[in-house]
Image (spheres, rainbow, N blue to C red):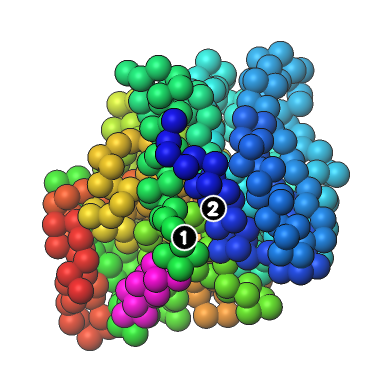
Amino acid sequence: MIDNFKEKLDKYAELAIKVGVNVKPGEDLVIRTPIECKDFVRLAVKHAYKVGAKNVYVEWKDEEVELLKYMMAPDEVFDTYSKWTAEKFTDIAKGGGAFLSVYAENPDLLKDVDPDKVQRAQKAAGPALKEWRSMMMTDEIKWNVISVPTEAWAKKVFPDLDTVDAVDKLWEYIFDCSRITDDPIAEWEKHNAYLKEKMDFLNESKFKYIRYKSKTADLEIELPKNHKWASGSATDKKGNLFNPNIPTEEIYGMPHKFGVNGRVRSTKPLVFGGNTINDFEIVFEKGKIVDFSAEVGYDTLEKLISTDEGSHYLGELALVPHDSPISNKNTVFYNTLYDENASCHLAIGAAYKSCIVGGDEIPDEKLDEYGINDSIVHEDFMIGSADLDIVGVKEDGEVVELFRNGNWVF
């Protein structure tokens, strides 16, 4: 058992409420979580009410029930999504509510499920949840993703440990990577300030292209006109700061939908739809994925890329140093929140419209004109490595070194 575990768990929950979603008096909060994470969730609910939350709604998820649905429910179920669920989230968001998601999936939950069912379910959910997701992706509302160990996830990360020790070790890593010290909130103020320095430099530089070079990457990404880089913290429409991810080490931006050329190979596994994709390579021409391969999970990767037109393009590029608390654990977490913040990454699918000046005002029919990708999916995959070099190229051709051997040079 970790020393002072209960104290650290309480601080972690407080961090999620005060820094993650930054709940204000009178606001509603929705917590979406696996049932195994109940101890953390109860503390989060307590801290939410302590800061003045009006209502805290908890949406419990049971992975075993989810698996039973995929294995036993009538086939037509996977082509529908309940209207009332989508309306509930949208209504709370429009009322100024915040959303906290506990991301702690069993990476192998759906390994025996037909990937076609998973894709169909996601396609059904996409249009139904589009308005709510758009409000998050434009930072109109406050949202946060955080993780809590579950037995299945911990055993996947540490297969040589018994279940109790695996969960304890994963907790230890999460507390460390999330800066759970004597004063986590003060630590996050310093960390957000550090990330902002990097973000400000990139925004002031106004690069036209970002170029990647390593043993596994040979890629050039054009940036849209009036693009904006973002960092660990964001601001909602009321001007309130929040942190969409805890932990986070990234500075992220928007690739031009039609301006990606080259090839890149994954450097960490990607868990998608309850399945693992690993050792995969993707080739881009004029933004579009024109070829791909995968040593593990090819069918799942194919389903991801073929979800819709936008899933053939990128929506995010993120810069993450190889020398960081998460990366230095030298551990594959099989959890995108952690693996993406240990590595430079790209995202297949929708772009964050907040990453372009006035992006939230651009109608869907004009997105292509601005180079903004739209899709019902947004899936990060990791490309960072210890030998990765990255440069930015300005409009006048000036080349600025950003990363050398996997790390910032400034």
Q: Which residue is at the front of the view, 278 or 30? A: 30
Q: Secondary structure at mark 2?
A: helix
Q: Quadrant of residue 403?
A: bottom left
Q: Main secondary structure of the magenta part?
A: helix
Hey, what amino acid is under mark 1?
Answer: Pro
User: Residue 49 location in percent, x, y?
Assistant: 75, 57
Q: Quadrant of residue 94?
A: bottom right
Which quadrant of the figure contains the C terminus? bottom left
User: Residue 285 location in percent, x, y?
Assistant: 33, 54
Question: Is residue 90 shown to the viewer in this render?
Answer: no
Query: Which segment did they paint magenta?
Result: 189-201
Q: Is residue 143 magenta?
A: no
| Left or right of residue 268, residue 108 in this image | right
Q: Secondary structure at mark 1?
A: helix
Q: Which mark is residue 389?
A: none
- Point 50% across, 23% down: residue: 152
User: Residue most toward the right?
Assistant: 84
Q: Is residue 190 magenta?
A: yes
Give the spatial CA distance, label 2 vs label 1.
Answer: 7 Å
Q: Which residue is mark 2?
A: 11
Question: Is residue 82 shown to the viewer in this render?
Answer: yes
Q: Which residue is at the front of the view, 410 or 268? A: 410
Hey, what amino acid is under mark 2?
Answer: Lys
- Point 58% across, 26% down: residue: 116
Badge 2 or badge 1: first in the primary sequence: 2
Q: Which residue is mark 1?
A: 184
Evaluate if marks 2 and 1 touch, with contact meaning CB atoms under 8 Å apart. yes
